[in-house]
Image (cartoon, rainbow, N blue to C red):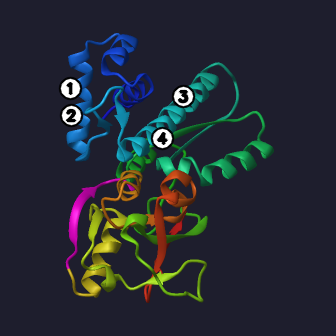
Amino acid sequence: MNLNTLKYVIAVSEEQSFTKAAQRLSLTQPTLSLSIKSLETELGTPLFDRTNYPVTLTPAGEVYVEWAREMLLSEDILLRRIRQTFNSNANVIKVGTSPHRANTIMVNIIREYREVYPDSHIVMSSGTTADLYQMLEDGNLDLILEDATNTDKTRFNVRFLQNERVFLAVPKSFNVEGTSDTDGDLPAIRLLDLKDYDFIFMKSGTFLGRTLLELCNKYNFMPNVVVTCSKVETAGVYAAAGFGITLLSELYVYGNKRVADSLDLFNVAGSGISRNLS
């Protein structure tokens, strides 16, 4: 999907009409409908209830529109920062990280950096881990904030930043209850007790995907996987929509209140999960 698709979905949600949204966007109605239909096929769920007029959002659509607004706001902020960079003689630092870390942990980092270097500009870039490391190697980034588990310390200077916990995220509609956990602020739950529920997996090349697969192997069961995706943002939206259980990182959860409010969060009993960010 691209940014135009996000704008299309938002326009239909605001106009409550594909025809009016198409007019607002200077598109033909069939073009707009086809674009959104392709997106719904990709997501595996409808975003709009077309059976009544005016058109309304489905529960998944409500989650998607909120996420789309956040993405477009981030794009606007980034573009303004880039323009400021080209229009000033200030020092520039180019930072790469995932979208959810850019919206959470980077807020305090930027604030503290600006207190020390008030004339600086920070240019944020987001992408996959592989893309960010390639941009760093090519000199297009000065530093990245990422999971340090597999960082090649012979090629990069690595500095520990903080430890990030990982939670098991269960849709509230599943009505799952955990047990008291004296070692943390969340209840704990045995992964084996969830073997009959649907799961959302991230790809095995990601930390969260690899970790969830290893946990399932540890407890000797193969879950029913209804969706596989590559980004924690997508997994969070799908879990909040009630599609299945997944693993979510602490920074993502606490930076997305709407998603968190739709989920019950648990520690995995017997398997405290965390990772170092550097």
Which residue is painted at 48% across and 32% down in the image? 72
How far apart, in angstroms, are the residues tagged by discs 2 and 4?
19 Å
Q: What residue did someone put label 2 on?
A: 38
- Quadrant of the image occupied by residue 4: top left
Q: What residue is disc 4 on?
A: 66
Q: Nearer the viewer, residue 104 or 185?
A: 185
Measure how far apart labels 3 and 1 are at the Cα level: 26 Å
Q: Pick whichever of labels 2 and 4 is earlier in the sequence.
A: 2
- CA distance separating discs 4 and 3: 16 Å
Return the mark for residue 105.
none
Asked if residue 118 lies in the magenta stretch, the reply is no
Q: Is residue 78 above or below residue 159?
A: above
Q: Nearer the viewer, mark 2 or mark 3?
A: 2
76 vs 217, left or right, is: right
* Left-right relation of 191 to 255: left
Residue sitting at 20 percent across and 26 percent down?
A: 34
Mark 2 or mark 3, earlier in chain: 2
In the picture, residue 123 is in which quadrant?
top right
Q: On residue 34, which mark appears?
A: 1
* Image quadrant where one finds the C terminus: bottom right
Image location of residue 167, percent across then percent down: 47, 71
Is the residue marked by circle 1 packed among few (<14), some (14-19), or many (20+) residues within 10 Å?
Answer: few
Residue beneath disc 3? 76
